[in-house]
Image (cartoon, helix red, strand yellow):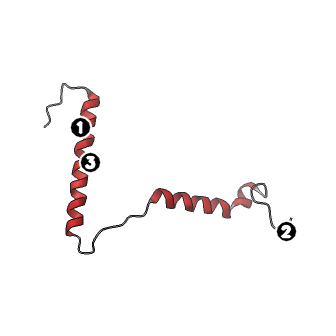
Amino acid sequence: MYNLRGSDPGKREAVAETVIVRAARAFGEGLARHDPRGRLELDDLTLSAMREHSEDLRNRGDEIAGSRWYPRPDR
């Protein structure tokens, strides 16, 4: 399609990535234009996952490491 058979493999990968990103962007823009509910807002999953993981570790501190991390209030 792009006549890249004899070219550098790195160049082929870069062209492939560019084509994929452009197609995904065009698809997303098409969805945004035709969605009657308006713009779709996505949660930043990285931040929410990190927050949830940290809270879980804090809640399980005694179970995981005893009282070394979070001293108990009665001591």
**From this viewpoint, which residue is outermost toward the bottom?**
37
Q: Residue at x 21, y 26 (%)?
A: 7
- The amino acid type found where label 2 is placed reads Asp
Q: Residues within 10 Å of mark 2 (few under 14, many from 20)?
A: few
Q: CA distance from mark 1 to mark 3?
A: 10 Å
Residues 29 and 62: in front is: 29
- Residue at mark 1: 15
- The amino acid type found where label 3 is placed reads Val
Q: CA distance from mark 2 to mark 3?
A: 56 Å
Q: Residue at x 71, y 56 (%)?
A: 64
Q: Residue at x 56, y 62 (%)?
A: 52
* Residue 75 percent coordinates (x, y): 86, 64
- Left or right of 65, for residue 47: left
Q: CA distance from mark 2 to mark 1?
A: 63 Å
* Residue 39 percent coordinates (x, y): 29, 68
- Residue at mark 3: 21
- Residue at mark 2: 74
* Residue 3 percent coordinates (x, y): 14, 31
- The amino acid type found where label 1 is placed reads Val
Residues 60 and 17: in front is: 17
Quadrant where the N terminus sits is top left
